[in-house]
Amino acid sequence: MTSTSPRPWLASAGLALLCTACAALHPPPRASAELRQSAPIVAPAGEADGNWPQAQWWKSYGDDTLDTLIDTAIGTVPSIAGADARIRAAQEDVRIAGAALGLTVDATGAFTRQRLSDNGMIPPTFLGFHWYDQSDLGVAVRYQFDWWGKQHAAVEAAVDRVRATAAERQAAALGLAAAVSDAYFTWQADDAQVALQQQTVTLHEQLLNIARARQAADLESADVALDARRQLAAQREQLAMMQGARQLDVVNLAGLLGVDAAALPALTERPLPAINASLPQDAGTNLLARRPDIQASRWRVEAALRDTDAARASFYPDISLHALAGLSSIDIGKLLETGSRAPQLGIAFDLPLFDAGLRRARHGAAMAGLDIAIAAYDDAVVNAARQTGAAAAALEQAGQQREQREQQLAAAHALSVAAEARARSELTHEGPALTAQAAELGEQQQLLRVELATVLADVQLKQALAGNPAPSEEKP
């Protein structure tokens, strides 16, 4: 009978193992991301010669009360505090990822007391004892090589997420500042509206008194007095609505600051700021580098790219060195003697040859995460362009509307002056002059609404353009 040599079988097995290893070492290509280079801003036609706002753009209004409100809001509201906590958590993730790199040292120690089985491999009768102690003491050292950049990619991804979280915090602060500014300027406009409406009510009270007096003198019919009474009631209703709106502005401000309304600083009436703003010439390109929400999305894309690098590196073997300076003895009294030395030194590598597609699936998940991050970036750019274009269009529209409102106010003022002149000349009674004054007050209210719309559009534009000139490249 002829015996078969095992060498061909061993050679075949070795060849199969080598082929499997080569397949395992074949990673997918490295990922890349193509991102927008400019924001598609659709703005009104006109000369773009505006300046970029500062990070604290609200200070350009020169209102100390507004500055105090925004500083308080940024320092106290839960949304900003939560953003700060997320930044700290992201920074700790960097430390966790970095700790996986390089050298680790562990102290080990153990004491075991064990009985030998009578039916074991070495009978106790041969050894002369049933019970024995085992004592071990040592220092284990391990060094993980990162030849393929897996751990480095994980650290870089964590760093990019810190940057993204910090940019998101800045975006939240800018959004909060805009909301506080809107509420504050709305209160200013509503307070001025209440003052104008109170004057209008006073005029209509005088008109009702005149109508009643002329009715008593048989100079007017009862219908005139009834209509004057109706108009007075309508103006008083309007005044009540305006006073309610002003109170709601206070409640809104207190809610934004997270405080009770009584804790707000004293709100005093002052004119709305004059606005003269336009888009910067390079708004379409530099907007990408200034907007914190776009910066945050950009860092999220970078983090997702590093995640794909880490997933790709898992197709290569993990290699590590390990050493143990240890002592081992069955007699604890001899544990520290020279003869109890039990050092170890070794090298290890780990390469899964068959994982049922696990690494491919992890890499696919990382690629899907990258696609999500890119889509979020594109969405942030489009939203930023839309917000910027809408604010610029609103400013232009408010400017055009203001010109017409100023002309209407000038005409109403001229009519009021003419009516007063006729009343002084006793060509007519005082009623037409009071009616003309009420009409002029109404035009002032309409102009005030246009001025508020202009200021709110300017706030929106400043929020859309504000941010840092460029994202920070420093690692936390």
Image (tube, grey):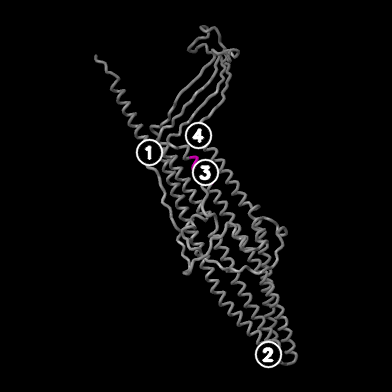
Could you say which disc has been placed on residue 422 in the image?
Answer: 2
Residue at figure coordinates x 56%, y 54% from the top left: 171
- Which label is found at residue 101? 4
In space, the residues marked 3 and 1 are separated at their CA atoms by 25 Å
Q: How many marks?
A: 4
Quick one: 292 or 18, which is closer to the camera?
292
Q: Main secondary structure of the magenta part?
A: helix
The kind of residue tagged 4 is: Leu
Residue contact at pointers 3 and 2, CB within 8 angstroms: no
Q: Residue at x 26, y 16 (%)?
A: 3
Number of residues whose C-alpha sits closer than 10 Å to that of mark 1, classed few (under 14), some (14–19) or many (20 or more): some
> Is the residue 411 above or below the residue 449 in the image?
below
Closer-to-camera residue (175/24): 175
Residue found 52% across the figure and 8% down from its top: 127
SS of the residue under disc 3: helix
In the rendered image, which residue does mark 3 sit on?
159
Q: Amino acid at mark 1?
A: Pro
- Sequence-first tag of 2 and 1: 1
Name the image quarter holding residue 226: bottom right
Cα gap from disc 4 to disc 3, whole angstroms? 15 Å
Q: Are marks 2 and 4 in contact (CB under 8 Å)?
A: no
